[in-house]
Amino acid sequence: MVAKKVSKTLKRIIGSRGRKKKKNGRPNESTQDEKDEPLEDIVRETEEERMKIEIREAKTRDSISKHLQKVTKELDAIGKKEVDVTGIERMRVEISKLKEEITDVEKFREDITKKRYFGLFSIIVFLILLIVPMPGLSMLGQRAIAIFVFIIILWVSEVVPLPVTAFLPGILLYFFGIYGTPTESFKTYAHPAVFFIIGSLLLAQGLTQSGIAKRLAIKILTYSRNNANLLLFLFVAVSAFLAMFISDHTVAAMLIPVAILIVSMMELKGPFRIALVLAVAFGASIGGLATPSGGARNAVTLGFLQELAGIELSYFTWMKAAAPLTLIMIPIVWIILRITFPPPKDFSIEKVLTELKKTVKPMSSRQWKALGIFAFTILLFITSSKLIDLGTIAIFGSILMFLAGVIDWEEAERSIPWGIMFIYGAAITMGIALKDTGAAEWLARGALQVLPSESPLLIMLSIIIVAAIATEFLSGGASAAILIPISLNIALIANIDPVLIALVTAIPTAFAFLTIYGTPANTMAYSTGYFKQKDLLKAGLMVQILILLALYTLVKTYWITIGIWSGTF
């Protein structure tokens, strides 16, 4: 703007001087005031323009400042709103937590109420069984039955933690005069079968802590060769094989995470993901019946046979009788799962395998030690004689694991459910008390009177069905603890081989294919959220029917051949 004004003024001056020069024929000789006048005008006008510009700039700065203040206020307001929103979200989270806590408290109150009712119910039943006459049964026998039923109700309802309940039999048996001293009452808590269970759990820890389990999982994926059906078969077979020597819940803890990894990395949404986790659960069940180390229920059965019938059943004899059932059921379970929950057409596990291989290093010395000690212990189990019981061998193997640095005690202390030794010690103690007081024989005679015939085949069928049903609602160990003392006395009364009856009682306690709480493996599979109870029934019912038929067929044919049963009907 100033430049334009200056330019116009200069042009006017130059034009004015030119005209005067032309008019006079010579340069203008006006006075100095006349010469300076246009310059003074220029300076004055320029100064005015400069002042106007400064005023305008000041106004602009003031306007901008006011605008900035306004924007700042608006931003502050927005910030406050954001804080308010954050506060609201925080309040919502807190309210959600409070609701969860309230729900937990309500659930806790409901549980407490149920437990109180069950506790009261168990006491009432206990008192009734102590008072009501039982013809043909001694007073000590009646007390033993009352204690037995009382403990079973507490175990089923879990009014108090199971390990705590497990101390009651030893106390009550002494208090009610069934045993004369506390030492006599508690001595079977240290039965070799209990140490067999502890040793087996420690051996399983050796495989888990050393990383052998993860390496085995990768081998499963490698051998499947991108074939979904082969992968499913390997899950069933490997789960069954592992469950022969370690508990089903340990097997589930090892393999179900691998199944979850496959499902998540392949983004499987269809039914095949159900097949993978049930392959682990069902495989663990059919494998756990094959050997004495396959489950605590098997160890308890050995203890009852030794204490109630005076028979020491070897590891190899059990395996020879029961392992064929496992071998028969592996392909059957595979086919049922494959048909019920078919695999997707575009199946590929290359991505999963690649990710897993990145985390696996060559076999370490610790892993070789774990594998060697485990194999050596299993060999001792199979070749053991009556001079060394299975409990001693299991503890010996676990000590070797510690000495070789395979197992860390602190980790084992955290991972192993040590209360289980008291539970099964209590179960054996109650079974022996029923026998010593004559209560087991009295119950066995009552059971025989219910049957229409004393045919060995009918007795066995009845026991098999009852055991299979019981294990769907009770744990396998609890079912064995309840049924085996009675079934062994039935065998003695009906002149049936106790080993035969013990096996047909213990083996079906592994047949938990219908309920999600039948075994820990079923519960772990259900916790993945891949299936519902009705999905379990779809496959489990057929597996249940076929395994009962398979056991019945083995009893009538193969067991006669190997001398477990004479074949008398």
Image (cartoon, rainbow, N blue to C red):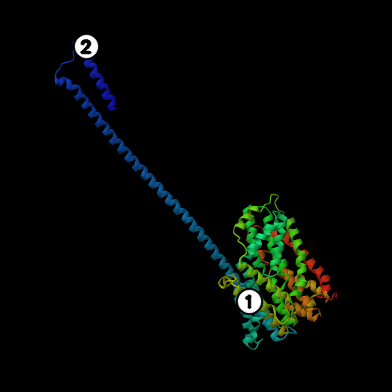
Query: Going 68% across and 62% down the picture, which residue do you hit?
Result: 280
Residue denoted by label 2: 22
**Residue 125: x and y, percent?**
66, 77
Image quadrant in which the N terminus is located: top left
**Mark 1 surroundings within 10 Å by alpha-carbon count, few (fewer than 14), some (14 through 19), many (20 or more):** many
Furthest residue in direction bottom, as rendered = 180
Q: Nearer the viewer, residue 425 or 409?
A: 409
Q: Quadrant of residue 426?
A: bottom right
Residue denoted by label 1: 421
459 relative to 14, above or below: below
**Residue 213: x and y, percent?**
64, 64
Residue at mark 2 to residue at mark 1: CA–CA distance: 132 Å
Q: Nearer the viewer, mark 2 or mark 1?
A: 2
88 relative to 413, above or below: above
Q: Is residue 448 left or right of residue 365?
A: right
Q: Nearer the viewer, residue 279 or 470?
A: 279
Q: Are marks 2 and 1 in contact (CB under 8 Å)?
A: no
Q: Secondary structure at mark 2?
A: helix
Query: Going 24% across and 28% down the picture, which residue do you hit?
Result: 46
Can residue 514 be seen from the camera position used here?
Answer: no
**Residue 488: x and y, percent?**
76, 79
Q: Quadrant of residue 45?
A: top left
Disc sitting over residue 58 in the figure: none
Image quadrant in which the C terminus is located: bottom right
**Residue 55: x and y, percent?**
26, 34
Q: Quadrant of residue 543?
A: bottom right
Dot 2 amino acid type = Lys
Dot 1 amino acid type = Met
